[in-house]
Amino acid sequence: MKGNGVSDSSNPLRRVGALFDGARDWWEHAKSWQRYLVYLGAIVFALILPAPWIGSFMSPGSDWTTVLIYPIGTYILLAVGLNVVVGQAGLLDLGFVAFFAIGGYSVAYYGTHFGWNYWATVLFGILLAAVSGVILGAPTLRLRGDYLAIVTLGFGEIVRVTANNTDEIGGARGITNIPHPPSIPGVVEFRLLPAPYYYLILVAIVLVIVFSVRLQKSRVGRAWAAIREDEDAAELMGVPTFKFKLLAFAIGAMIGGLAGGIYAGKAVFIEPNTFPFILSATILAAVVLGGAGNLPGVILGAFVIAWLPERFREAEWLENALGENPAEYRILLFGAVLVLMMALRPEGLLPSRRRKAELHEGTGGMGAMGAEVAGPDTEVSTEAVK
């Protein structure tokens, strides 16, 4: 690679990512039966994941099944939704938590005040989140890059502050006694046990992944890729960019609303501080860390972001090394690990080949909206230096 005089092969940090690249390349050329075997293995693994013997290692200090629901499952669902906006369409959204809040409050408000059926409140929350995405996107999607990020950040805070000051939806006290999903006699009973909620969120994740993959391979996905790489060129080629950007916002919002509805049904209590700005930033970090635009990478990034702080809470080797409770240092350690990961893999843990090429060429980066963005190996322009 030109520019910095250090090739990929001579950089020891980048060799660590060779395994991930090898797995990605194998997957791209894998035969159908091999892919179906991997899908089957992933489903079996997901079904047995709450097993206690796995939890004894993954989360010795907390209930593993509960951790799988929140934060891991919820983060994965949110990351897949944000990936539609950021990874596929290239729109930098810093207020994604607002749609999570809208979904949660819809289930809480209509379930407790009007006695609506849980599933009806979830569907209504998804619809309301999609409408909110359109309302937010219609006047703002003509902005690009940083300006769009600032507007979406403001939207997220407006939703939280509005919830905090609206007595009708509980104000700062929030809403309690949110109804659980109705039980299915003889099949599943949703009450206090976490296992049914884990399988519920697992089904939601699978459905959202299938939907997202179908979109990515469709005309819509190709239009999003064109907008992400160069919006001006896409518009000149006849792509209705505004319509497709609005669609990305609405679909991402729907997935965020779904995650909020499932979370509220499990938590039975929500309040405005459940939806802080830092949650938007955390989900964005998961998307970037995993490899924006690549679903397996995004899922892996969300898992790592959600799981590491819980793992550091009760690590015996860490307690021996520090001589005190590691829980006090877990966020510090979590941040150090994230820095190390981004040093190892600046394009993300599992970037798609196309996104990796875009980032290395310095075009079509996240939130660039077609503008040029410096990539990891982009040479500094002599003219720019002058």
Image (cartoon, rainbow, N blue to C red):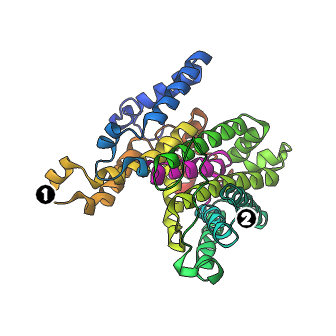
In the image, what residue occupies the spot 38% across and 41% down? 344
Determine which residue is flagged by label 2.
132
User: Is 151 positioned to the left or the right of 350 in the image?
Assistant: right
Which residues are the magenta region?
Answer: 68-94
User: What kind of residue is marked 1?
Assistant: Gly
Q: Does residue 380 appear in the picture of this structure?
A: no
User: Is residue 69 highlighted in magenta?
Assistant: yes
**Helix, strand or loop at disc 1?**
loop
Q: Nearer the viewer, residue 303 or 201?
A: 201
The amino acid type of the residue labelled 2 equals Ser
**Nearer the observer, 13 or 291:** 291
Residue at (61, 52) in percent of width and height: 82
Q: Mark 2 and 1 residues: CB-CB less than 8 Å, in contact?
A: no
Q: Is residue 167 left or right of residue 134?
A: left
Number of marks drawn: 2
Give the answer, above or below, for where 4 lies relative to 244. Answer: above
- Which is nearer the N-term, disc 2 or disc 1? 2
**x 58%, y 81%: residue:** 171
Residue 294, relative to residue 384: is it above or below? Answer: above
Q: Is residue 4 left or right of residue 364?
A: left
Is 157 included in the stretch rendered in magenta? no
In the image, residue 131 lies at what x, y percent?
A: 76, 62
